Amino acid sequence: MSDVGTALDVPGVKLVAACDCYDGRLAAAKEEYGADVFTTRDYREVLAREDVDAVIVGTPDHWHAQISSDALRAGKAVYCEKPMVHSIPQGKGVIEAERESGKTFQVGSQGMSSLGNEKARELFQEGAIGELNYAEGFWARNDPVGAWQYEIPEDASESTVDWDRFLGQAPQLPFDPLRFFRWRNYRDYGTGVSGDLFVHLFSSLHFVVSSKGPTTIAAQGGLRYWKDGREVPDVLLGMFDYPETDAHPPFTLSLRVNFVDGTSGSTFLRLVGNEGAMDVTWTEVILRRNKLSGPTDVFTQRKGDEMEEVRTQRKQMLPPAETVYVADRGYLGAHFDHFMNFFEGVRNGRPVVEDATFGLRAAAPALACNNSFFDERIMRWDPDGMEVV
């Protein structure tokens, strides 16, 4: 319930209702936030309440599109966890529900609201790295919880879990606590490491360089360590080609996730240009610049040789080779900033950056990466029309 905790840090926000398919979480909500919190297994009962202005959709991925659309049409603002959809075709339905309702809708890739992402965007627009030609990002983990080995409560049973409601439109199967509590490991409910983590990197990249997305997508990887019955890889690499646009030149993106990384706990996005590079996290940006043209420039050297002045050529004042930008001490973090942006939209009608259209353009390349891996083929994506081609 980390989303709830952060949302409640925003002044004037109160939790009045909670919905979950496991009774233990509903009891925990009352214990943590007060006995007056309304709880239910049926999300529609929450949407019917007049005292609910906004909802957080923190469900398994296969429920994101349905609940988000229902909530928007019920007149509620929506903060939907990433990825926005479980499958690409669901995206335009959410966009349409957002348009029809006029309500604030924001996807929960919180990094793009961070000081780090905002500084990187500023530097990129100033031309700090020259012309972008390559980008890379990675997410490394090396612990059971990080690899989705979530705890199974001792009281998990068909009486404490609403299994049929959890399944929804997914294939009907007998009750399985592993599938319920570790749903990210199964394709019927989750979207694997690409949908869970690549989508963060896509969101940040698209925000920083004002991109709509790639056109060509390919993936490789496999299940290297967590052979626990999961259906998705624990090591995945994706390659993505971005076309030239008014906002950026053509470039190639490389992404990787490793759930068996001995270095553990590392994540960043790197942008490489012909004049420098940036390493971007949510709280820090490291800018590295190439030296400016000096006496080793071919033309300068040739003319210097002709005039026998190479050894006396005057040196230049060069900018720092590396500049580090760090968030101020006491920074409340990207998660808080993202919720602040969301609630400003709810209260004042201020547009949010990560709306449904942005959300689909971040989710679709991640989901297409999964398709490339499982179908063993290269995927083509139209980021303008937002369609697989």
Image (spheres, helix red, strand yellow):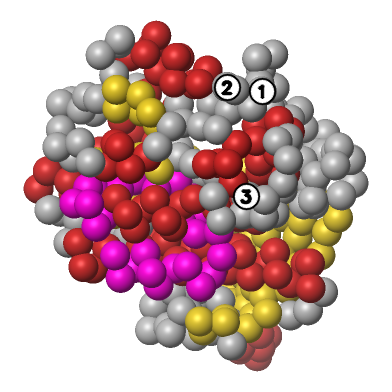
> Would you say residue 73 sits in the magenta stretch?
yes
Q: As shown in the figure, which amino acid type bears the numbered disc 3? A: Tyr
Chain-order first, disc 3 or disc 1:
1
Segment colored magenta: 72-97
Res 318 seen here = no
> Label 3 vs label 1: CA separation?
19 Å
Give me the residue at 22% from left, 52% from top. 74
Residue 203, magenta (yes or no): no
Q: In the picture shown, does residue 112 fall above or below 50?
A: below
Q: Is residue 102 above or below residue 134?
A: above
Q: Which residue is mark 3?
A: 189
Question: In terms of secondary structure, where does tag 3 sit?
Answer: loop
Front one among 44 and 80: 44
Whether label 3 touches label 1, CB < 8 Å:
no
Residue at 43%, 84% in the rendered image: 385
- For label 2, the residue is 160
Residue 15 placement (x, y as % from top left) = 27, 25
Local crowd at mark 2 within 10 Å, few (<14), some, or many (≥20)? few
**Front-lying residue, 217 or 154:** 154
Task: Give the mark toward the camera: 3 or 1.
Answer: 1
Q: Earlier in the sequence, mark 3 or mark 2?
A: 2
Quadrant, the C terminus:
bottom right
Specify the amino acid type for callout 1: Ser
* Secondary element type, mark 1: loop
Give above or below for 123 relative to 43: below
Picture quadrant where residue 338 is located: top left
In the rendered structure, which amino acid carries the disc numbered 2? Answer: Thr
Disc sitting over residue 224 in the figure: none
Indicate the position of residue 170 as horizontal and vertical percent values: 62, 54
Measure the C-alpha gap from mark 2 to mark 1.
5 Å
Residue at the spot of label 1: 157
The answer to whether residue 180 is seen in the rendering is yes
